[in-house]
Amino acid sequence: QVQLVESGGGLVQPGGSLRLSCAASRSIFTINRMGWYRQAPGKQRELVAAIRGGSSTNYADSVKGRFTIYRDNAKNTVYLQMNSLTPEDTAVYYCNAFLLLNDYWGQGTQVTVSS
């Protein structure tokens, strides 16, 4: 099992940046895949970015070139650096870990992009 705790959300103006953090309760080196999902009001949860054990990454088309997912194995933490934010990025962002055929989720952190 793994517990995930997100932080770093908040209110930001369009064009601004935020960095989300996801701290895991175990070594992320042992986790097959970690990722960030988001869910906007009235919409389904969608994958934003994911990173695998070999540090390969993939991104939703809507965030390519603006968001970067990376990991710090020593801190058991995965980050999502979000730049050039737009109101369409407003959502609750969830950290996800895929481990031993199970999905684990954090509690979510709200990101609001508004002037």
Image (tube, rainbow, N blue to C red):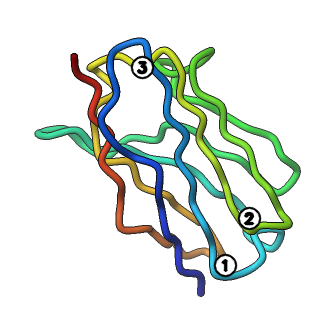
- Residue 82: where, in percent of width, then height? 53, 29
Residue position marked by numbered label 2 in the rendering: 32
Question: Cα distance, mark 1 to mark 3?
Answer: 34 Å
Disc 1 marks a residue whose amino acid type is Leu
Sequence-wise, which precedes: disc 1 or disc 3?
Answer: 3
Disc 2 marks a residue whose amino acid type is Asn
- Residue 50: where, in percent of width, then height? 63, 45
Residue 100 is marked as 1
Sequence-wise, which precedes: disc 2 or disc 3?
Answer: 2
Q: SS for tag 2?
A: loop
Q: Nearer the viewer, residue 97 or 101?
A: 97
Residue 32 location, quadrant: bottom right
Instruction: Please tell me whether residue 65 is drawn above or below residue 47 in the rendered image.
Output: above
Disc 3 marks a residue whose amino acid type is Leu
Q: Residue at x 58, y 27 (%)?
A: 67
Q: Residue at x 49, y 69 (%)?
A: 5
Instruction: Sort mark 2 into few (<14), some (14-19) or many (20+) by Cα contacts within 10 Å.
Output: some
Task: Give the mark toward the camera: 2 or 3.
Answer: 3
Residue 68 location, quadrant: top right
Instruction: Sort mark 1 into few (<14), some (14-19) or many (20+) by Cα contacts within 10 Å.
Output: few
Residue position marked by numbered label 3 in the rendering: 85
